[in-house]
Image (tube, coloured by chain):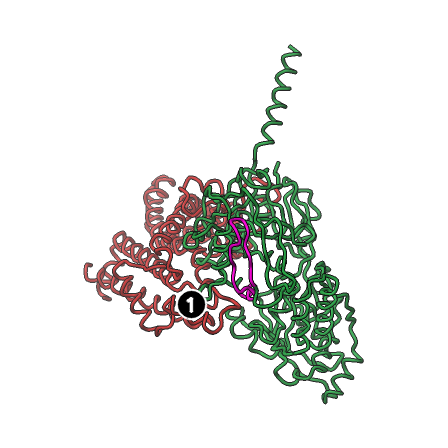
Chain colours: A red, B green
Amino acid sequence: MLRMLLRRCFLGAVTVAIVSAIIFLGVELLPGDACTAFLERDAKGQMLENCRKDFGLDRPALTRYFEWAGNALQGDLGMSASGRKSIAELVGHRMKNSLLLAAVSLSVGVPMAIFLGVITGLWRDRPIDLFFSTVAILAMTIPEFVSATVLILIFSVWLGWLPGIIVTSASAPASEFFPEILLPVFVLAMVMMAHILRMVRSSVIEVMAGDYIQMATLKGVPYWRIVFSHALPNALLPAINVVALTIAWLLGGVVVIEVVFNYPGLGRMMIDAISDRDLPVVQAIALIVASVYVGVNLTADILTMVANPRLRTLNMRGG
Amino acid sequence: MNYLLKAVSLGAVMAAGLATAEPSGTFRQAHDYGFGEKSSLDPSSPGRIQWITEKIMNRLVSPDLAGIPEADLATEWSANAEATEWTFKLREGVTFHDGSTLDAADVIYTFERILDPDGTSPARSALKMIESVSMVDDMTVKMSLNTPFADMPLQLMDYRMRIIPDGSGDMIGETGIGTGPFKVEKYEADGTTVLVANLDYYKGAPKLARMEIIAISEGQARIQAFLGGQTDMYRYVTAQERVLLDRSDKYNVQVIPTGNWRGLVFRTDVEPFTDARVRKAVRLAADRQEIVDLVYGGGAVVACDTPVEPNDQYRADLKCPQDIEQAKALLAEAGYPDGIDVDVHVSTLEPSWSNLAVVYQEQAAKAGIRVNVVQAPSDGYWNAIWMNKTVSATRWNERPADQALHEIYLSSARWNESFYKDEGFDTLLATARRELDFGKRKALYAKAQAHLLETAGTLIPIHVTKIVGVNARVKNVDAVKREAIRWHLIEVD
């Protein structure tokens, strides 16, 4: 168990390292750099050279990469390309905001999704199931930016009930993000619920058809006791992984949503940094997002193993 | 009882009357955070956020509602007979937001900082004619020029030449201390910057108590914020969006002609455009009115290859209808009886470029000019495409006539995008700069523009008209360019 855990952690670290290298390479390959983006028409001759020197862009890419990676390992993410602010400080608020968005969306979305998933699973093919399953498919297939724009149009422009765009400062306390945060939460919860609902539904259907449920029914155990003490604990197990994936997706900066709603989280910061060619910031965020993604998935895997002895032994043999 | 009610309501009315005398209400506006991390409150830096600097700082000379130079921090000015020395008298009793009083030292500091060869100010190129700035007395400064320049006040209206306190250069990017109607309470480039009324503003206290300038980098989000009433003004309404605004009584629409132009540049140093006849032919092939209608939905004014804006006092009165026959004849004369093939480079950097190129493609085909539209990446466009490829799309923001002609067409100009070299044209500009008589000067600039229409390598079919959306709760927004808006007069309900 311990060996496997270590192995998983090691693989996670390798993944993060590879991701960081790929991101670095990708940004390097783009035409233009921090200086051409900044100077625009002025990006010529001496002015361009001076700027590149100031930003340290005249050194070889490999040198810059390893220097940065080394510092990042020690927890020093460096300064933003303009050299004015420490990235840790910049990222701090954004991280908090992304966490806030994720937390609110999850606390609304996950319980609702599981509840509806169980309902639709138990009442399979009844009108209520058909209704929610269809809505779920719609929610999954409509791109987020479309549903976001439509919701802004309805609730903000036409009805004027909710603010459509977030205009609160990144550094503001969490409470100030209400009610602005509601529309993005709504959009996120919708997409997220669709995925989890479908997962839970099929899992409930599968479990309810299992031998031990039939056995319990034959023994005369009341229906609701079967559901609560036999079916659900088993049916919800696979949901852990979907929820984990969702958490990773949310914390990874839901870029599109953050940009559409102007939400000051990691995703929007990433986009701003990319158009700025602010390499240090892009790399730092990529690293954080990759670590979060790997970390959350790792946690989910371990939880699933702890909860399910069969998986544990299977993996032991394999590893 | 009745009397009591009346007394109470009278009191309320009086209180309300008093309250309106005080600055009140908040005006919100979005900016695109286009300079990202390099954003700054330093008015002359490459990262200046003009959306903020225009409200917190003043210039020596600013445009009046018609765009003519008007006294601002300078109350009067005069030139010597050769127009090589300009003297500016400063306004008495103007204070900066930090309490210090404006004097000649501040003005000299501001200009020397812009002119510093080691500095990064892009405004320097507009002030190249200044040799030195010196103090005559506490409230008078003198600018000595290295060339005669009759329109110096016009040049000083540039939006970047805002006066900052002496010695404040290291901090100005964060503090934004100026003399303007609003002062910075909290500066946050990527969030919401809060400005509050400067009660000591020399033109009188602003009507608004507060302004919030909000960073919204996504274009779609900016318009949504305006439509949802979260911001009060949106200055980039497209022709399509205008329809939406016109139908609603929640917004007012202002239509403002500008000097911003879009066009196509044919490099005059590359075959076949080394021949002035070919250059004229490619420009004659354009049907400009059709471009106005098809590409800009009517939101533009025809230009005859002159960068000088439609309302500028120096704009030449030119005609430039499409003439396919003459274009063909010129091409044949230049040795291209079968027409020419042209790769026109555009990118999504400017949304209208692609449409402009496609409409031009159709028009030019009739004259035997076979246009192939090439989509280039937006990233690095100014670096790798513009002034590199033989034919590329261009766009410029408005400039005073003299500046536009000098910066883009003079043989030695750094941004001579078409590599246009014409001694006759250079001489015309030099003569115009020297001429202190307005009528004669105007005639010379008109001649220069007519010369461009004959020989230039740049097709400038239009000047863009700006459509501005203003929330109906906002009053007294001058329907003019940003440059000239009197921000202190704006009120909100």
Residue B166 x %, y %: 45, 51
Quadrant where the C terminus of chain B is found in the figure: top right
Residue found at the very far left of the displayed protein: A2
Q: Can residue B441 be seen in this view?
A: yes
Along the viewing direction, whichever of A128 and A102 lies nearer the viewer: A102
Q: What element carries label 1?
A: helix
Quadrant where the N terminus of chain B is found in the figure: top right
Along the viewing direction, whichever of B459 and A95 lies nearer the viewer: B459
Q: Give the range drawn in magenta.
A: B125-144
Q: Relative to residue B56, is residue B293 drawn left or right?
A: right
Residue annotated with mark 1:
A51
The type of residue carrying mark 1 is Cys
Residue found at the very far bottom of the displayed protein: B335
Q: Relative to residue B145, is residue B256 drawn left or right?
A: right
Along the viewing direction, whichever of A163 and B186 lies nearer the viewer: B186
| B199 is within the stretch colored magenta | no
Using a 10 Å C-alpha cutoff, classify the residue at mark 1 as few (fewer than 14 neighbours), some (14 to 19) or many (20 or more): some
Q: Residue at x 57, y 52 (%)?
A: B60
Residue B372 x %, y %: 64, 78
**Main SS, magenta residues:** strand
Task: Give the mark count.
Answer: 1
Residue found at the very far right of the displayed protein: B325
| B129 is within the stretch colored magenta | yes
Res. B353 image quadrant: bottom right
Along the viewing direction, whichever of A180 and A118 lies nearer the viewer: A180
Say above or below: B164 vs B493: below
Res. A278 image quadrant: bottom left
Residue B66 x %, y %: 70, 52
